[in-house]
Amino acid sequence: MTEPGAGFPAPGVASAATGPSPAPSPAARPSPNIWEHPDIYELENRGVDPDGVLAREMRRIADWRGTRVLDVGCGSGFHLPMFAADAARVVGVEPHPPLVAAARRRIAGDAAGAGLDNVEVIEALAQELPCEDDSFDVAHARWAYFFGPGCEPGLAELERVMAPGGTAFVIDNDASRSTFGGWFRRQWPAYDHTAIERFWRRRGWQREPLLIRWDQPTRAEFEAVVGIEFDPQLAASILREHAGTGVDYAVNLWWRRY
Ligand SMILES: C[S@@+](CC[C@H](N)C(=O)[O-])C[C@H]1O[C@@H](n2cnc3c(N)ncnc32)[C@H](O)[C@@H]1O
């Protein structure tokens, strides 16, 4: 969850990513953490925000009960069930084929459980949404490195598909504060959080600065997750300096009403 927005140098898999990405879409923003380590990323998603701060704050700004929800860059679809539980319809968009397949498996259910029949997962890019104009009331993009400076085509698409009165959310790291923010700045020293803020504000987005927790059930799991988020040397320093299974984590919930 650490890579910076699209206006910054591509991460170039500077992280702990090792093996080749299976058939990445050339126009997709490289996301080595989830592309190369989907199983560890799944554990990470379970450990992020155990107190539900983000969901509570999003619901306060725009409750998605009974609405049409778009999850852009949905990855393996971790957040689709949360929306599906009370939205009328949910569409997940994801360009990386193995993650599209994983998200579809997640919503299909299994022999023991029913699937989510109000959810669809589409293989597509944020900048080429195969969706009709004015067709969503709520949009969500979490750890969406493909948004931010340089991603104007994706934002234009978002504007096109959002219905009047709809609300879009972008959840991103706040590198200016928290222990996690400090680790982020060590990994990306050129990251200019004030420029990122200017970028969003100029386009009419509002910021909710939030402080969440990231906590894994065991130290071994915490180490694995730190290992996919930071380059190996930095990950080793972090783990030498930082005890325990979790960390305080500042995030920005950016949102815009259309
Ligand atoms: C860090 S992952 C976050 C996944 C998911 N939002 C989550 O919270 O579990 C970023 C996702 O964005 C996808 N992505 C990259 N470039 C994209 C683009 N241009 N349009 C839409 N999604 C993109 C990646 O394939 C990856 O699944």
Image (tube, grey):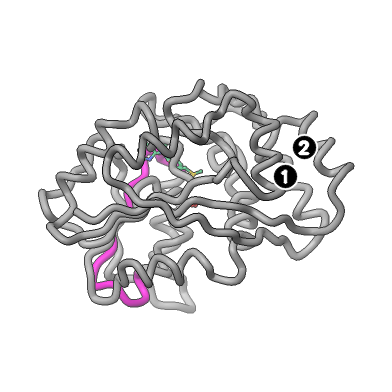
* Disc number for residue 44: none
Magenta span contains residue 139: no
Q: Residue sitting at 53 percent across and 29 percent down?
A: 192
Q: Is residue 128 left or right of residue 140?
A: left
Mark 2 burial class by Cα count in 10 Å: few <14, some 14-19, many 20+:
many
Q: Quadrant of ligand 1?
A: top left
Q: Position of residue 246 (x, y in %)?
A: 74, 58
Q: Residue sitting at 56 percent across and 25 percent down?
A: 11
**Numbered disc total:** 2
> SS at mark 2?
helix
Q: Position of residue 150 (x, y in %)?
A: 35, 26
* Disc number for residue 235: 2
Query: From which residue to which does the magenta span run?
Result: 84-98
* Disc number for residue 226: 1
Q: Amino acid at mark 1?
A: Val
Q: Position of residue 148 (x, y in %)?
A: 39, 35
Q: Amino acid at mark 2?
A: Ala
Q: Position of residue 190 (x, y in %)?
A: 59, 23
Q: Is residue 153 visible?
A: yes
Q: Nearer the viewer, residue 125 or 192?
A: 192
Q: Is residue 85 left or right of residue 184?
A: left
Q: Using the image, determine if residue 111 lies above or below residue 37.
A: below
Q: Residue sitting at 60 percent across and 50 percent down?
A: 41
> SS at mark 1?
helix
Q: Residue sitting at 64 percent across and 26 percent down?
A: 189
Q: Nearer the viewer, residue 130 or 174?
A: 174
Quadrant of res 167: bottom left
> Image quadrant for the N terminus?
top right
